[in-house]
Amino acid sequence: MYAECALKNTVLMVNDKRLTNANLLNETQQMIPQSLIEKLQSTQHLVILTGAGVSAESGIATFRDALTGLWRNYDAQSLASEFGFLADPALVWGWYEWRRIRVLRAQPNPAHHTIAQLEKQVTKLTLITQNVDDLHERAGSCEVLHLHGSLHQPRCLLCEQPYIFPKETLPENDKENRIKPPRCHLCDGPVRPGVVWFGEQLPDHAWQLAQEACRHCDLMLVVGTSGVVWPVAQLPYLTDKKRCSIVQINPLKTSLNAVAAFNLHGKAGEILPQLYAAAFSKD
Ligand code: APR
């Protein structure tokens, strides 16, 4: 199934073993291994793959968090699909608008800032994200491969014409509402979120660049992803085992624990700055 899914380049959830608090490891100060520090200092091509966990400390809920309020009886996977949108456009558009407003109110956290700083320290950095927010860009990262699209770039469901949000002041609160999607000004079709839904293809160019970078990098940081959504979850497995080390940063164990050379268990906003300071701080 993996091969078929990778071939079709279609978003699919697999192997979603629900993780519980039993997997939560201590948030104690991590000891950063010296061999990792040296690897980071000498890397020629660093790949960083981020997931929802990197934005968690900015107050953005991850996907495996249970939905609340208006959406409590749904799971993210059913809302994040064309089927879900067609079944109840106002419910799904309202959910994405609620998330977009939360993102607009949020600020990048130390994990996003550290990743942007790393760009200045290493010879080459490829930043790949599954996140549909713009917190990496707002932290200063220049080039971000958004494999799952963006909350901020909706388009017409029928003719794909991009839709520009009207200039608006942010609502006072992020109340949960059913909201009818706007209509396309060209063809009057319903506007849909600019994200990649389950069952849809990843953006081809970004996906090619991401795979290429993983095949050629010598260090890969995998930050805040459960690794259950394919094909992105296969990226760490494309790296060259002989020369690339994989580093996982996540408070929980994931299936990547078995293959990562370094598993740093804790919050990205704490571990990434520690790792950066250990490798690049002058004192
Ligand atoms: N720092 C690092 N990791 C964290 C933190 C934190 N502060 N908080 C939570 N995490 C970890 C969780 O332990 C979990 O493993 O982040 C991960 C978030 O997992 P998911 O919610 O599954 O997010 P992600 O892997 O990005 O999901 C992939 O699924 O629904 C789709 O398209 C959606 O892009 C999304 C995709």
Image (cartoon, helix red, strand yellow):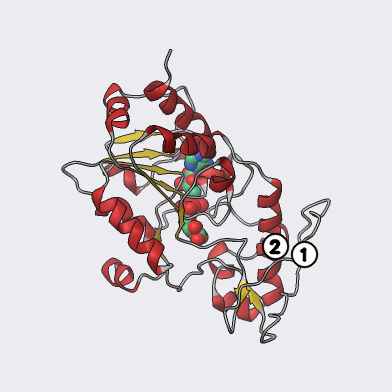
Residue at screen point 43% across, 20% down: 281
Residue at screen point 68% across, 68% down: 164
Q: Position of residue 171 (x, y in %)?
A: 81, 55
Tell me if I can see residue 21 in this picture.
Answer: no
Tell me if I can see residue 133 in this picture.
Answer: yes
Residue kind at label 2, given as amino acid type: Glu
Asked if 107 appears above or below 130 in the picture, the reply is above
| Callout 2 touching callout 1 (CB < 8 Å) | yes
| Viewer-side label of 2, 1 | 2
Residue at screen point 33% across, 70% down: 5
Q: Position of residue 147 (x, y in %)?
A: 45, 60
Kindly state the secondary structure of the residue where label 1 is placed.
Answer: loop
**Marks 2 and 1, how far apart in space?**
9 Å
Say which label, 2 or 1, has the lower sequence index: 2
Tell whether circle 2 marks a residue whose Cβ is less than 8 angstroms from ligand 1: no
Asked if 221 appears above or below 233 in the picture, the reply is above
Kindly state the secondary structure of the residue where label 2 is placed.
Answer: helix
| Residue 177 numbered tag | 1
